[in-house]
Image (cartoon, rainbow, N blue to C red):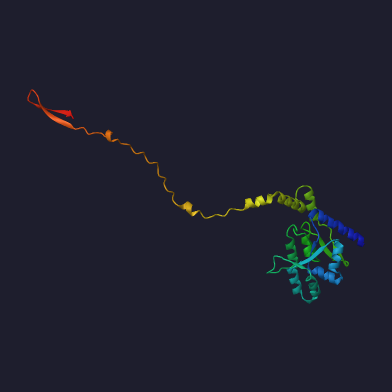
Amino acid sequence: MKIKRQKQAKKTISFYKFNFNFREPFQILIDGTFCQAALKNKIQIKEQMPKYLMGEIQLCTTNCALKELETLGKELYGAKIILQRFQVRKCAHFKSPVSASECLLSMLEETNPHHYFVATQDHTVTTGLKKIPGVPLLYIILNTIVLDKPSQTSLDHVQAVQLGQMVSPAQQESLHSLKKEQGITKDRERRGKKRKKSNPNPLSCLKKKKKAGPTPPLKKTVEGEKRKRSRHKKQRVEGGDGVAAAVVTNS
């Protein structure tokens, strides 16, 4: 039975590696319910989880999951001690903690971009996880850790990618790396940046001076070419009829 379970887990991990670009070390997001079940069934999470997943792992939790165990009292004190040993991932509820189920679902967003495995016994969380494509689910049953089969949402997503209706996460990363190599992303970033409005140059605000036009050439005058004023002399001449007539003579 153990060999069959190991083969099924290997097949499921290969599915997530190939279709959703999961890589080692696998990040396992754990809540208090999983720790409590491991404590009751005497399961050593740190020792058994890497063997079952056949690779390196990172065990982590959230601040909300720890706060929830603190409020539940002494009954879950042992689970709290186990959970405190794991890395704490930052969530958006640092100032106002929420329930562990709500916090875990918010960490996965819509497409599980950080490639988390989720280990939980909470039915609310498992129901929500099955609606998100590419989320491996771990739980404890019959004193053993079990990796659930891919959900129908994950299978539908893979089928849509194969039909060309969607782009897989692996294809998105390869496209992004190709764009980086060719410098396409940098060009877009440069184009997207808006130029800041700068103050006008104070020298450009000054009024422009009018350009002096060409001075007309001075007229040359020759002393000898000055016009002489003509003087008119009037002479009185007596006619035959005794009428004096004025005769103009030029001098």
Residue 134, image x, y percentages: 78, 57
Q: In which quarter of the image is residue 102?
A: bottom right
Instruction: Return the residue nearer the eye: 74 or 59.
Output: 59
The correct choice, above or below, for 216 with respect to 21 in the image is: above
Quadrant for the N terminus in the image: bottom right
Q: In this view, does 186 lie to the left or right of 84?
A: left
The correct choice, above or below, for 14 with respect to 164 in the image is: below
Q: Quadrant of residue 114?
A: bottom right
Residue 142, image x, y percentages: 88, 66
The residue shown at (79%, 75%) is 77
The residue shown at (81%, 68%) is 34
Instruction: Return the residue nearer the eye: 125 or 226.
Output: 226
Residue 130, image x, y percentages: 79, 59
Residue 73, image x, y percentages: 77, 76
Q: Is residue 88 left or right of residue 251?
A: right
**Number of labelled discs?**
0
The residue shown at (79%, 48%) is 162
The correct choice, above or below, for 106 with respect to 169 in the image is: below
